[in-house]
């Protein structure tokens, strides 16, 4: 197998991977970025509403209020040291982006435009804040392209359309790089690195209806699981309140931030009942549950009363065109209606993976050692949606995911740069360390038998949607877990008929399904185990939050399969802890 | 619904051919896009190869030639297509397999346009100011998704893909020339001198015709030419 050597390997070229890559390239580290799609096709490109930072360009604001909102939004499951770090670093992260060329929308003062978003307050739970920095409703696109452009300038080395097969580590648990496959030629390539950063994004493709790109299959999470790393807090999956009903395309929270609101079948502005103060700008978990409840209780809209409406027409065509042009285009394309005139049918839709590979605030992957405290895994980092720092806890605030990838992409890179000063040579790669990757590749060269990959994937996403949705209970989760286990067995017998070496997407999809299967198991197992309701995890059989027993992070291990737990880091870096309180909006 | 799709796998095919497919009308729902149909076909024939990701026209993966016109499969309505729907790879690029083309030449020209903000002033501790009017100059430019529909519809680019930057790259040139924060106007214009890099554009306007995001590279190229003329006076 051909081998290339770099200081750092980054797997994934979304915002997290590219922010880290830029920091490393500028520090003259030799960095390789591996991505299964050309970098600007990564899913960061689809982020719409904006990135949170207490710039106070519109109304008074400060990072401490942002921190409070994030802790409260997380339903107190977020680690407060990491949250403090992120909120303090936010203004600088956004200013850096501006200097990189991101075309932010502007206020009349010439400063960066900011809009209201859900779960934001001034003065620790007071009036609505205006904290989300936006480039119209294409903020993710603007950020991803600018980061890629700056990486071109910094001459970062890209391996475009390479699919990462498996991480490489030695017996002592030191991570040494990865085996990737050149999709266009089918050739495997060993990329040796002193440090490896996973930045592979989330796993929205677990669910049949989702806002995510087809590439969001949790590849990094699954590789970590198979390498013996647990996944943290996987039961917390965010359902965005406003996906296009039945289709799933995202309608940004910024639509409500600009003044849009939700209506049920009676024409009632129902969020006033669920969140008397924040109304339509309550946290996403709260709004999603409210919509699902309205529909369950028969107050939905449409022939089947199966959705609600997002009303924007009162804002005036000017605001819709100027502030939400991408949404307007998309709704016109897919629904044949103009949201400046006609309300949009919406329903909660699978959107964001709060859980992921456990890390500390430097992006180092951390695992508990025996029964003791957690320690960094040598050579391995994770950033962005594939990671769990945890800054989002049980529910992420809108505008905090772009912030997460910027702040921790940068932080991880800075930590790597320090590490590289001491780690001057590559560790030797044992001969047998490549075996898992080669076995995985060879497995799909066998003759086809059993079921089709597309069929199994459709069944998996249906199971997850039916058994692991907005509302959950013991019986349904248990059924779901059994079904995923059975399906995972059946995948063993599945095969593909296409054995071409050239751009074989059937093989890629088969390996993606393997990844989805492992992460699905982590998600449904963690959900079954957690017998309380917190943030996005709503158990109708355990409707209350239970801080006595459950103020702790879940850890799912694949082999042997078991749940483990670790405490939430309640102590911030410099300020007082925010103790758990009842959460109302 | 009937489809005729370009197939070529260099691993097993001596030469390219067109393959007919048919989808039962029962499988087709109203409002479906071409990508939905391709995904249904791929579920039946896993060897059919194409790129796709976001499914909503923002990632730019699934540019292809649809009934003779470049476009994105994910935002092309099935109901608006004549049958059989003839689908070919983006024209003028080397085919890797089926509808997947090698875009390296396209990306290289993008890089040649120096598509990044250049500002050599000391870095301020806050944002650089830009008025809403200055920022408006970037509308219609920054939204490009690099799908390559425009450049691969351009006869000038077909003839000289190694010398003419092409509409997508030149749109980016203007995006930075038009940015009040960028200071590299001289350098950018010098970079575009000569008979090919910029001036091979003969305002055929195929790029404008096909851009799935409604952008106008020809107008951007015109603006660059104006700047060039002004500079030479």
Image: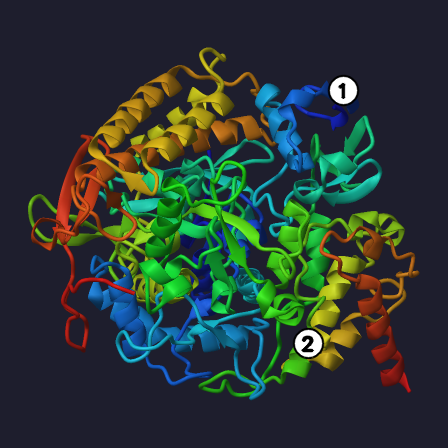
Image side of residue B106 versus residue A374, left or right: right
Can the viewer see residue A171 in this picture?
no
Disc 1 designates what residue?
A: B20
Quadrant of the rendered image containing residue A450: top left
* Residue depicted at 27% across the width and 30% down the height: A476
Q: Residues within 10 Å of mark 2 (few under 14, many from 20)?
A: some
Quadrant of the rendered image containing residue B23: top right
Quadrant of the rendered image containing residue A295: top left
Chain for disc number 2: B
The residue most toward the front is A266
SS at mark 2 in the image:
helix
**Pick the front one: A467 or A160:** A467
Q: Looking at the figure, which quarter contains the C terminus of chain B?
A: bottom right
Give the x, y percent position of residue A103.
59, 72
Disc 2 designates what residue?
A: B136
Give the x, y percent position of residue A248.
51, 44
């Amino acid at each position: 197998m051909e081998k290339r050597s770099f200081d750092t390997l980054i797997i994934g070229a979304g915002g997290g991977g590219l922010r880290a890559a830029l920091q490393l390239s500028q520090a003259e580290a030799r960095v390789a970025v591996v991505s299964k799609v050309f970098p600007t096709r990564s899913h960061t490109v689809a982020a719409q509403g904006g990135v949170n930072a207490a710039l106070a360009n519109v109304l008074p604001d400060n990072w401490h209020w942002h921190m409070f909102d994030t802790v409260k939004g997380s339903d107190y499951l977020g680690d407060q040291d990491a949250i403090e770090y992120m909120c303090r670093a936010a203004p600088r992260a956004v200013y850096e982006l501006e200097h990189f060329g991101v075309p932010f929308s502007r206020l009349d003062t010439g400063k960066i435009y900011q809009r209201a978003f859900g779960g934001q307050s001034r003065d620790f739970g007071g009036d609505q804040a205006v904290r989300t920095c936006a480039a119209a409703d294409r903020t993710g696109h603007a950020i991803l392209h600018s980061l890629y452009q700056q990486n071109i300038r910094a001459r970062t080395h890209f391996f475009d359309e390479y699919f990462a097969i498996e991480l490489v580590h030695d017996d002592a648990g030191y991570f040494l790089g990865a085996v990737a496959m050149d999709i266009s030629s089918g050739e495997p390539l060993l990329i040796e690195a002193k440090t490896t950063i996973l930045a592979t994004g989330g796993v929205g493709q677990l669910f049949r209806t989702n806002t995510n790109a087809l590439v969001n299959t949790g590849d990094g999470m699954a590789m970590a699981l198979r390498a013996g790393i647990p996944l943290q807090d996987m039961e917390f999956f965010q359902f965005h309140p406003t996906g296009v009903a039945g289709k799933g395309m995202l309608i940004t929270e910024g639509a409500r931030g600009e003044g849009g609101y939700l209506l049920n079948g009676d024409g009632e502005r129902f969020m006033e009942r669920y969140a008397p103060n924040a109304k339509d700008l309550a946290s996403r978990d709260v709004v999603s549950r409210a919509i699902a409840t309205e529909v369950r209780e028969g107050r939905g809209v449409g022939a089947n009363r199966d959705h609600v409406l997002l009303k924007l027409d009162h804002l005036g065509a000017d605001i819709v065109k100027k502030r939400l042009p991408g949404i307007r285009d998309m709704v016109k394309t897919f629904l044949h209606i103009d949201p400046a005139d006609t309300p949009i049918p919406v329903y909660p839709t699978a959107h964001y993976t709060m859980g992921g590979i456990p890390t500390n605030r430097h992006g180092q992957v951390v695992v508990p050692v025996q029964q003791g405290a957690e320690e960094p895994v040598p050579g391995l980092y994770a950033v962005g949606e594939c990671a769990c720092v945890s800054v989002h806890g049980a529910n992420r605030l809108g505008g905090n995911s772009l912030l997460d990838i910027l702040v921790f992409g940068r932080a991880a890179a800075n930590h790597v740069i320090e590490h590289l000063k001491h780690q001057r040579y590559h560790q030797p790669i044992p001969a047998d360390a490549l075996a898992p990757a080669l076995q995985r590749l060879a497995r799909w060269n066998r003759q086809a038998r059993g079921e089709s990959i597309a069929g199994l994937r459709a069944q998996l996403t249906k199971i997850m949607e039916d058994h692991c949705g907005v509302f959950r209970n013991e019986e349904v989760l248990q059924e779901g877990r059994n079904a995923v286990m059975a399906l995972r067995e059946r995948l063993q017998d599945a095969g593909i008929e296409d054995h071409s070496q050239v751009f074989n997407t059937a093989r890629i999809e088969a390996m993606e399904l393997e990844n989805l299967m492992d992460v699905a198991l982590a998600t449904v197992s963690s959900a079954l185990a957690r017998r309380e309701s917190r943030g996005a995890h709503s158990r109708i059989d355990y409707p209350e939050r239970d801080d006595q027993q459950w103020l702790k992070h879940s850890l799912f291990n694949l082999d042997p399969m078991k749940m483990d737990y670790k405490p939430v880091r309640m102590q911030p870096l410099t300020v007082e802890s925010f103790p758990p309180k009842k959460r109302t909006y | 619904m009937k489809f005729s799709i370009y197939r070529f796998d260099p691993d097993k095919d001596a030469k390219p051919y067109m393959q007919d497919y048919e989808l039962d009308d029962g499988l087709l729902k109203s409002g479906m896009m071409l990508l939905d149909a391709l995904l249904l076909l791929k579920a039946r024939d896993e060897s059919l190869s194409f790129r796709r990701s976001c499914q909503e026209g923002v990632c730019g993966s699934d540019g292809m030639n649809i009934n003779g016109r470049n476009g994105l499969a994910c935002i092309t309505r099935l109901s608006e297509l004549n049958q059989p729907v003839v689908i070919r790879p983006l024209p003028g690029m080397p085919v890797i397999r089926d509808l997947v083309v090698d875009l390296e030449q396209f990306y290289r020209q993008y890089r040649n346009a120096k598509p990044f903000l250049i500002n050599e002033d000391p870095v301020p501790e806050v944002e650089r100011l830009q008025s809403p009017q200055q920022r408006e100059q970037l509308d219609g430019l920054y939204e490009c998704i690099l799908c390559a529909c425009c450049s691969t519809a351009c006869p000038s680019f077909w003839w000289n893909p190694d010398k003419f930057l092409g509409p997508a790259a030149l749109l980016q040139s203007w995006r930075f020339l038009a940015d009040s924060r960028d200071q590299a106007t001289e350098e950018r214009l010098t970079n575009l001198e000569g008979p090919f890099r910029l001036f091979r554009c003969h305002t055929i306007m195929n790029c404008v015709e096909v851009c799935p995001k409604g952008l106008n590279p020809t107008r951007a190229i015109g603006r660059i030419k104006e700047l060039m003329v002004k500079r030479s006076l």
